[in-house]
Amino acid sequence: MEITSFTTTVSDFFTIANNERSKFDINKKQYVIPKYQREYKWSLEQVKTLISDINKHEKFLGNIILNEFPDFYEIVDGQQRITTLFLILIALFNKNKLQPPSGRSEEQKELFKFINHKDHEQEVIVLKNESIGNDYLNITADNIELNIIDANDIYYQKTTFIDIFNLIVKELSSINDLRSFQNKVLDSQLLILIGDTRGRHNDSIEEVFLDINFKSKLLDVADIFKGYCFKNYSKSSHEELKSHWTKVRKYIKEFEKIGYSDLDGQTCEYIYHYLLSKPDSYNIPANLSNKGIHYLENKNHSQTREILVDMGNYGENICDFYSKLHDTSYYFEDIYSEADRYKNNILELSILKKMLISIIKNPNAQYYKFPLFMVIHYIKKHENLKNTLTYEQFKKFVSNYYAYSFLFVSKPQHKSKALINKTIFTALYKFDSGDPAESIHSGVLEATKVLRKEYLDEYSLAKIFDENKAYILYSLMDHYSAQDNFVKDIYEYPNFNKEHLIIHDHKKAKIDWEEDGNSFSFYLKELLGKDGTKYLTTVYKGHTANYIILPTALNGSLGVKDIVTKINLIKNHYNQPGTSMPKHIKIFVDNIENLSEYQNLVSLKGQSKSVPEITDVYKKFVKKYYSESNLTVLHTQLSDGLKTSFSQ
């Protein structure tokens, strides 16, 4: 490929000038950011830094790599800077409006030539961005506004664009000499590299981008991956490649909604996790390059295409599956063939969906998620797997995976790649090697049970209360049926709520002592004296020992009542016909009732004792409940309560 290179000014760049300095083709009226390129993602801080640097003096703004087409230049590298400069020029245009408004000012006319060009008597926006639609600007005589239509915003950039533009407007308002700043912007320098697609060689301008970024260690993992795809693909198939990459790029953004991220270009978790599931890359590093050799190095066109197509289909299958989980009429008809027989099992189907949503939307470590994603992906792409998977197998798999995922994120080291267990992947790849589909289901289910058991044996209850984990912990403890291998109910807000059992969420930890003829209020913060502030820490208020999960109506009736009244109300609620006290609540109640200090409190009821006498006994109860010896007992009881749920 023949490369044209030259330095130019921002002014010449946006006017696409051809002069002694700039060698643009003046017949081209537009730059295009194609939709297969990454989204705009500069941070507010990066934009502030750029404006500040330019305001000090015009500067060199780096390389811009372009691909030449008959009617336009395609931006291969530099879209973040070019987009930011374009937004700055638009903001400057708006700043130069006449006061009061009376048409376009001379200053605006000067700036407008950098924003819009005439092409055969039609005006075209100088910078077209296919990922936000062609008409993303609303242009009037003296004002330009962003007009990004949601339906055209394929990478969900609208909010980012609005925030960045508002920041630019704010930053410009703090600059005293806008004319001087404008001149510095327009005089700043760019190094332009243009690939001539008419050249004799079969190289791609994307390979120039790859050489500059990868070999200079200016790594952006997703774009480097894309660059290798262009390198490995036949040039005649580049348009097909762009389509496949656009699909992958779309699902990189979609996966951000379930906790995946593209961390400053250094790790693209969507691509990274997909490759971690492959036998030839189980231990691949986050930059996808092992000892300087990229994963796609030496892969041919067919191998690269197979990876890219499957990676896009993987995202499509998972996002489609996750979306359907929120549909009450969905009964997993695309997962197992006998779904029609069980579509009226509304309660069980609802529980399955709740467990799967909980697994997928948990924002913590992603490593436990993608074995599940790969199972769903394989089922949806291999009809044989769907045809042989039974409803009971799927129920058991999801229940055990729900338990495993909770136990996984409960480990302190859950962000370590070393924790990934490959047995589920191994079972899946047996199918690719010709093993019968039935062995996949039994292998995956057995692998998930082993994972659940392994993590359960190591489980230790956290001292600091975590509401999301508590809902899952107590759902498993109270509702897992070892006989059925199924979680028969799931706690979730708003039907259930956390109860501040001992220390209420009141500024001073108020307690209402309820007794006929002798009711009064007091505050634990004052009662506990020098230790009164501890209830604000994990020692008291934030401790796991302070919370149980109750039906919302029951929770609301407890308020800030004293502990004796609370225990009686809880026991009365679960003594009703057809109800039984859940295991985790019974553990708390039994623990409290076994304390002599609590029994002393019980004995005071109806005795009309003095306030100091009652509060003194109450203080002793709180101290005993939160004593190290009792907390150790309670923690052991709760941990054992979870473990026995899987064996009873």
Image: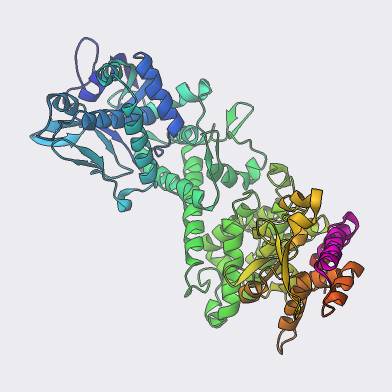
Q: Quick check: 125 left or right of 533?
A: left
Residue drawn at (36%, 29%) of the image: 171
- Residue 581 visible in the snapshot: no
Query: Front-most of 362 and 282?
Result: 362
Q: As drawn, which residue projects farthest toward the top?
A: 20
Q: As drawn, which residue projects farthest toward the bottom?
A: 577
| Residue 37 image offset from top left, x and y in percent | 38, 37
| Residue 240 image offset from top left, x and y in percent | 36, 43
377 w.r.t. 187: above or below: below
| Main SS, magenta residues | helix
| Residue 156 image offset from top left, x and y in percent | 39, 47
| Residue 555 image offset from top left, x and y in percent | 65, 72
Residue drawn at (74%, 72%) of the image: 478
- Residue 622 visible in the snapshot: yes
Q: Does the magenta stretch include residue 317?
A: no
412 w.r.t. 187: above or below: below
Q: How many labels does the image show?
A: 0
Residue drawn at (73%, 45%) of the image: 413
Q: Quadrant of the C terminus?
A: bottom right
Q: Does the magenta stretch include residue 617?
A: yes
In the image, which residues are magenta?
610-638
